[in-house]
Image (cartoon, helix red, strand yellow):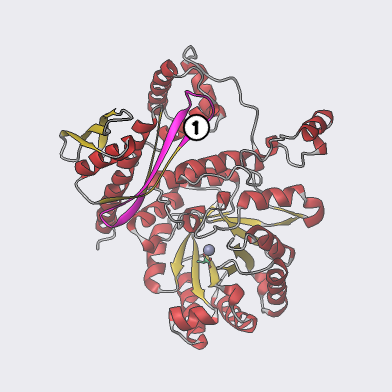
Amino acid sequence: MRKIDIFDTTLRDGEQSAGINLNTAEKMEIARQLERFGATVIEAGFPASSPGDFEAVQRIANTVKNSTVTGLARAMKSDIDTAWEALKGGQQPHLHVFLATSPIHMEYKLQKTPDQVVDIAVEAVKYARKFFPLVQWSAEDAFRSDPEFLVRIINQVIKAGATTINIPDTVGYATPQEYGALFKFLKENVTGINRVKLSTHCHNDLGMAVVNSIAAIENGADQVEGTINGIGERAGNAALEEIAVALHIRKDFYGVETGVNLQEIKRTSQLVSQLTGVVIQPNKAVVGKNAFAHESGIHQDGMLKNRETYEIITPELIGETTAPLALGKHSGRHAFKDRAITMGFELNDQQLNEAFAEFKKLADRKKEITEDDLFVLFTGKQIENSDASIYELTNVQVQYGTSNVPTATVAANVPSGENVVVATTGAGSVEAIFNALELLVKGHVNILDYRVTSIGKGRDALGEAVVNLRFNGETFTGRDISQDVLEASAKAYLNAINRKLVKDQTQVRVKEMVGQ
Ligand code: KIV
Ligand code: ZN
């Protein structure tokens, strides 16, 4: 069967979405999971864009073994040099270099003539091939480019040594028929197109990213690009889990295979959602929480008689198994360790001991510890210390009454090493806490978004708080999970502040490392 390579850009195009900021440990965790998911290529970031991206790409390239790791670069030597520094330790160094080819991008953004654009692209690919055995060249905004110009420039970049050619629908404007026809045209008209990999990369502005990607595959694409849960700028990218499952369920029709380990889909989706803070819509195909729920009586009756009456995908296919018995306060360390392993976590002894101690504390306050609770607990342990608790909440207390002014008192360890206590009021309990924390961090903080959700079901469910804020001119998202939503909110706020401070520290560290 024809093989379609999966190029995952969750950590680059996905991370570019508003409000997402992953630290290096979180990116590493996602990269390791993408490797298990079976991504052929993992785009780990854009090394020249920030020291944080550089560091994450370098660590991922040095760690991941079963997927090719790539990084993005503009068509300029300095970007390519930086990318090489980040990627050279990888198994098979791969670069993704791009340049816009549509009339509007060339004229207004690049302010270059088409001839100049061809020269820049060729120079960049030739230069990249001095270092990288694998070079993907992308024609940004390819779908809105002149197809004859695309043929001309692609002919030249293939001659210059590109090993993959990517044809993005950058603004999500294509229809499946048109996008498929463009692939057919390029297949028929570009010299040497069969010697390189041809790739599709779709955005979802008109809700057609998945179907456009499949149209490209039907018309000769060898590789499909996208993100987990379809996250990405604006309306997002093509959702890879949907493409993988559609091609699998309808292999009778499409006749292709992806090599994706379908059983890892649920876990990958859950991890990306948890670490990015991007909630999955309940009715989302394949991974939404209602994707396998049958509500109506007629459907339930049919399902009881024969599941295939209404079920074309089984939850088991994507690794969603019936939850095993919940653990409780009497569960022992052995059962706890076994569960961590079954759930795919690789915790060392110290992490396991710490996780077990937290589990016991939680089990004293919560009757049943569910799979969802364990997932957040184990994930948290695996990525711990990544945001080095520069500010660490030690106490939060709120006085609230329907006819009183809410007052919050917070205590926290601060960077100087002291424990500082601050109290102030607000229009509500959360505002009072946030006002007190603003006094503590001594900067100007704007809250852009704030959300509280429950993990799993029941009145004693854990609460997750996500705070998106602007601190000293930069936007960060913080998360925390706790049994009390006010405590989770205070910790999520400080988590966002700590991310900013860790980012500043990384900047200094990487600059020292590369000698700037
Ligand atoms: O959408 C796009 O054009 C991109 C390129 C950088 C490949 O993401
Ligand atoms: Zn894109």
The amino acid marked with disc number 1 is Ile
Q: Residue at x 46, y 44 (%)?
A: 277
Please identify the quarter of the rendering in which residue 480 is found. top left
> Label 1 CB, ligand 2: below 8 Å?
no
Q: How many marks?
A: 1
Does 502 sit left or right of 118 as displayed? left
Q: Is 458 contained in the magenta span?
A: yes
Q: Residue at x 64, y 67 (%)?
A: 198
For this view, does 399 lie left or right of residue 283? left
In the image, 439: left or right of 15? left
Quadrant of image for the N terminus: bottom right
Q: Name the image quarter holding the C terminus.
A: bottom left
Q: Main secondary structure of the magenta part?
A: strand
Residue that numbered label 1 is attached to: 455
Q: Position of residue 349 (x, y in %)?
A: 41, 25
Residue 30 image point, x, y percent: 49, 45
Closest to the observer, 383 or 452: 452
Front one among 75 and 417 = 417
Residue 293: quadrant of the picture = top right
Residue 433 appears in the picture as rendered: yes
Magenta span: 453-476
Can you give x and y, in whole percent of width and height, for residue 217 in the image? 70, 62
Q: Position of residue 424 (x, y in %)?
A: 21, 37
Closest to the observer, 5 or 315: 315
Q: Residues within 10 Å of mark 1 (few under 14, many from 20)?
A: many
Q: Looking at the image, is 49 positioned above or below residue 129?
A: above
- In this view, the residue farthest toward the front is 403
The outermost residue toward the top is 330
Secondary structure of residue under mark 1: strand
Q: Is residue 131 magenta?
A: no
Q: Is residue 389 visible?
A: no
Task: Say which residue appears at 37% left-offset and 57% top-offset.
Answer: 54
